[in-house]
């Protein structure tokens, strides 16, 4: 008897010692779709099935989008034993059937919960039910969990996110863990062994440079979110990513702004989680979201986040080191008028001290590919002359 107790103790403590996140699940930034930005609480199995269908027919799946994530408000109540149920009216077939449908399309299934007793939308959160919820999600075939931070007063963030990480790991089903803590407690400093991505800011909204004040909190336009990424790039790498929030492409900004937004998320090696109505996309939205050359910059295997190398009069030059010595360079015009550009590559030495990379066109001549015009622009031996429209980008890939 004593030996059995000792054995159980050893097994229990070793399972604690080895509690960990699932490795190798996010060697490049996760790509997918999430319901929140466009649909808020209006989620249903009909919407999710139609979205999965549209992700296949629009070419998004082919471009690399994988996860179909149902955000807040899918929940019903907990049953008598504490197991969470989906809202029966909006998810009449149940979550296992929905997961099966998503998987049958070659896509992956994502879901949402919260650290607190209630989600931000007032639905049941996971507090005190972490292991029960993780097992339930695994039984539904869930592949991705976004875990929010509402109603977390008095809760230790590291403890709360570690508890759910361990609960997920205990199910033995590989589940990407998306930490949505809004950057409040600097997750980039502690979440690397816990999650695969962590939100760095409060919520995004579909405007270029605004703040939407909701009283106790604000949501932020694309440029505001971009500025909040300062200093964070050293924390991202294959396996764990800074998450500047889900995209607003196709949700009401101009085509130029959407293009700039998408380009900058690729420069940031951000998770590319679309947040629009994929069933009704205009051609321009679809072309932005499925530009494979821009996506390749985001998904580059080196996993180094880009940085603003030069900034002058509302025009920023962002640089991102890529595999094989390539670079992505993105000219971002934040201003209200078009800017004529005359850029002498040889006079603009770019140095990335954090990752020991340098771009020196005096030493090396690079071939230039325009990733939106989808054409060659010669080499870095000559001065680049072009125009960057207002709230738009010129995004290039430089190859040795
Ligand atoms: C928070 C998150 C959002 C979204 C909502 C849902 O605000 O940051 O991304 O999940 O909750 O209520």
Image (cartoon, helix red, strand yellow):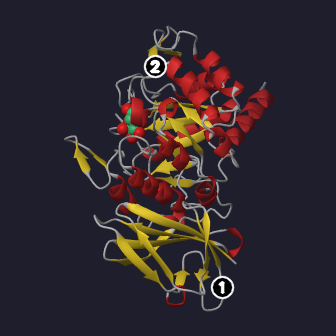
* Left or right of residue 211, residue 202 in this image: right
Q: Position of residue 130 (x, y in %)?
A: 53, 29
Which quarter holds ligand 1? top left
Residue identified by numbered label 1: 365
In the rendering, at what x and y percent does residue 289 appear? Answer: 54, 46
Vertical comparison of 96 with 234: above or below: above
Question: Looking at the picture, does residue 370 appear above or below residue 87?
Answer: below
Q: Is residue 116 visible?
A: no
Q: Is 338 on the left or on the right of 108, as rendered?
A: left
Mark 1, Cα crowd under 10 Å, few <14 / some 14-19 / many 20+, is some
The quadrant of the image that shows the N terminus is: top right
Question: Which residue occupies 44% across, 64% down?
Answer: 393
Residues under labels 1 and 2: Cα distance? 56 Å
Q: Are marks 1 and 2 in contact (CB under 8 Å)?
A: no
Tag of residue 75: 2
- Please indicate whether residue 59 sits to the left or right of residue 130 in the image: right
């Amino acid at each position: 008897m004593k030996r059995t107790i000792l054995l159980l103790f050893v097994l229990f403590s070793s399972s604690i010692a080895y509690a960990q996140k699932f490795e190798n699940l996010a060697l490049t930034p996760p790509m997918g779709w999430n319901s929140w930005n466009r649909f808020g609480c209006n989620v249903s199995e009909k919407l999710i099935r139609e979205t999965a269908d549209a992700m296949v027919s629009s070419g998004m799946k082919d471009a690399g989008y994988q996860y179909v994530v149902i955000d807040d408000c899918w929940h019903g109540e907990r049953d008598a034993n504490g197991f969470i149920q989906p809202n029966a009216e909006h998810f009449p077939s149940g979550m296992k059937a929905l997961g099966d449908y998503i998987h049958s399309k070659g896509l992956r299934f994502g879901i949402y919960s919260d650290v607190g007793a209630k989600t931000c939308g007032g639905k049941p959160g996971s507090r005190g039910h972490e292991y029960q919820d993780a097992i339930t999600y695994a039984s539904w075939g869930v592949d991705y969990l976004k875990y929010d931070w509402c109603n977390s007063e008095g809760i230790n963030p590291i403890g709360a996110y570690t508890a759910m990480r361990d609960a997920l790991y205990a199910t033995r089903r590989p589940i990407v863990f998306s930490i949505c803590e809004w950057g409040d407690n600097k997750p980039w400093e502690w979440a690397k062994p816990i999650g695969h991505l962590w939100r760095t800011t409060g919520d995004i909204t579909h405007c270029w440079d605004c703040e939407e004040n909701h009283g106790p909190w604000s949501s932020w336009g694309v440029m505001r979110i971009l500025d909040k990424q300062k200093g964070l790039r050293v924390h991202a790498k294959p396996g764990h990513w800074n998450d500047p929030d889900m995209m607003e492409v196709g949700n009401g900004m101009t085509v130029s702004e959407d293009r700039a937004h998408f380009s900058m998320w690729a420069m940031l090696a951000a998770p590319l989680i679309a947040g629009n109505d994929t069933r009704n996309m205009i051609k321009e939205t679809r072309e932005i979201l499925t530009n494979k050359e821009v996506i390749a910059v985001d998904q580059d295997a080196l996993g180094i986040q880009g940085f603003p190398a030069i900034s002058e009069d509302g025009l920023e030059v962002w640089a991102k080191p890529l595999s094989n010595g390539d670079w992505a360079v993105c000219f971002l015009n934040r201003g209200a008028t078009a800017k004529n550009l005359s850029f002498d590559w040889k006079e603009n030495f770019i140095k990335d001290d954090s990752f020991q990379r340098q771009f020196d066109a005096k030493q090396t001549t690079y071939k230039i590919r325009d990733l939106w015009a989808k054409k060659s622009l010669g080499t870095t031996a000559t001065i680049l002359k072009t125009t960057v429209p207002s709230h738009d980008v010129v995004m290039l890939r430089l190859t040795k």
